[in-house]
Image (spheres, rainbow, N blue to C red):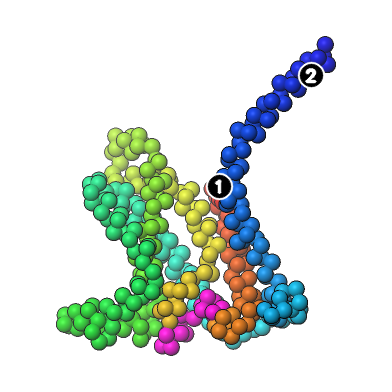
């Protein structure tokens, strides 16, 4: 009797297992394109990190290039330019984390508080548009407006009794200009995710807060910000992974002989050594160093976030 019951249960369970597999098959198929992307463009290229320990020759390939061990790393950390590159990169990255990262959050909070739909949609469209403008156009426009001779803004400043702003000839203007251009170009686009998260907050929470006498600022502090806290933490941790990536194109377009001592970062250094001088092994060492710093920051920030009760990224 028991054997018959066990056999009947197995016959019942087997179709259920097949049905479960067929039911979830479309979801597994949806994962395949993303999985292939990471395998082909993220994991397979990691094999190329071997050239960091070689004197890589593109004519003989990775497998036949001579092995030099840690010589490239020793050369990198003892290079006379390393302290300057590290200092400039950390200063730019610090400005990005402290001032640029909060900009989309502040913009999203302001847009979320706008009650007139037409004004809100208009401002959103205006703020999103710079994201689609290339850095070449943005830097060229800045150079045209702030040119020493013929620049519209500098001419207006001179006519108003002020002196011209020498953005490209005085090194102290480079970092503020870089930061403001980043905010102008990326704050609007970066606010989209925060706005979407704010839209998912239960409206009854705001109604209850109004009944309790809470004003706009208190509603933002006690409802809106806690409602988007998880997204802020996750995006902050992910941003730390690119802490050392300042952006080659932008900084390279702003760079000139007058501001090289404050604009030379690891990204521009890799271009000079890896592309212009064709020292691919040495440039791979720089890239590996940047990646390891980003990995350490992500692991540390995620562990700290979980320690304070947040979910983190894993």
Residue 262 counted in the magenta span:
yes
Quadrant assignment, res 298: bottom right
Quadrant assignment, res 160: bottom left
165 left or right of 281? left
Q: Nearer the viewer, residue 172 or 217?
A: 172
* Residue 221 seen in the figure: no
Q: Nearer the viewer, residue 229 or 61?
A: 61
Residue at left 27%, top 86%?
148
Image: 203 above or below 248: above
Quadrant assignment, res 274: bottom right
Could you say where residue 90 lies in the image, as x and y percent from the top left?
51, 73
Residue at left 31%, top 51%?
111
Residue at left 33%, top 46%?
218
Q: Quadrant of the N terminus?
A: top right
Q: Which mark is residue 311?
A: 1
Q: Which residues are magenta?
A: 256-271
Label 1 – label 2 distance at C-alpha? 44 Å
Q: Nearer the viewer, mark 1 or mark 2?
A: 2
Mark 1 and mark 2 lie on one chain; the one further toward the N terminus is: 2
């Amino acid at each position: 009797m028991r054997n018959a019951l066990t056999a009947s249960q197995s016959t019942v369970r087997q179709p259920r297992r097949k049905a479960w597999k067929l039911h979830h098959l479309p979801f597994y198929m949806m994962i395949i394109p993303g999985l292939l992307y990471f395998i082909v463009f993220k994991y397979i290229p990691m094999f190329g990190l071997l050239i960091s320990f070689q004197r890589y020759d593109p004519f003989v390939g990775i497998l036949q290039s001579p092995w030099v061990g840690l010589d490239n790393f020793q050369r990198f950390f003892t290079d006379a330019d390393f302290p300057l590159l590290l200092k400039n990169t950390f200063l730019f990255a610090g400005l990005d984390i402290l001032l640029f990262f909060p900009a989309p959050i502040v913009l999203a909070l302001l847009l979320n508080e706008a009650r007139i739909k037409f004004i809100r949609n208009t401002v959103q469209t205006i703020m999103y548009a710079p994201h689609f403008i290339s850095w070449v156009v943005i830097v060229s426009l800045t150079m045209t407006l702030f040119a020493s001779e013929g620049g519209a803004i500098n001419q207006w400043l001179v006519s108003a009794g002020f002196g011209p702003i020498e953005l490209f000839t005085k090194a102290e203007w480079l970092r503020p200009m870089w930061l403001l251009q980043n905010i102008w170009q990326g704050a609007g686009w970066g606010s989209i995710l925060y706005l979407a998260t704010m839209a998912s907050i239960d409206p009854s929470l705001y109604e209850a807060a109004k009944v309790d006498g809470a004003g706009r600022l208190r509603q933002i502090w006690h409802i809106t910000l806690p409602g988007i806290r998880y997204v802020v933490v996750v995006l902050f941790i992910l941003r730390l992974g690119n802490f050392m990536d300042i952006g080659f194109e932008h900084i390279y377009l702003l760079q000139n002989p007058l501001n090289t001592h404050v604009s030379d970062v690891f990204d521009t250094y890799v271009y000079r050594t890896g592309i212009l001088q064709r020292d691919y092994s040495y440039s791979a060492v720089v890239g590996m160093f940047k990646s390891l710093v980003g990995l350490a920051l992500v692991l540390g920030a995620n562990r700290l976030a979980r320690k304070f009760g947040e979910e983190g990224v894993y």
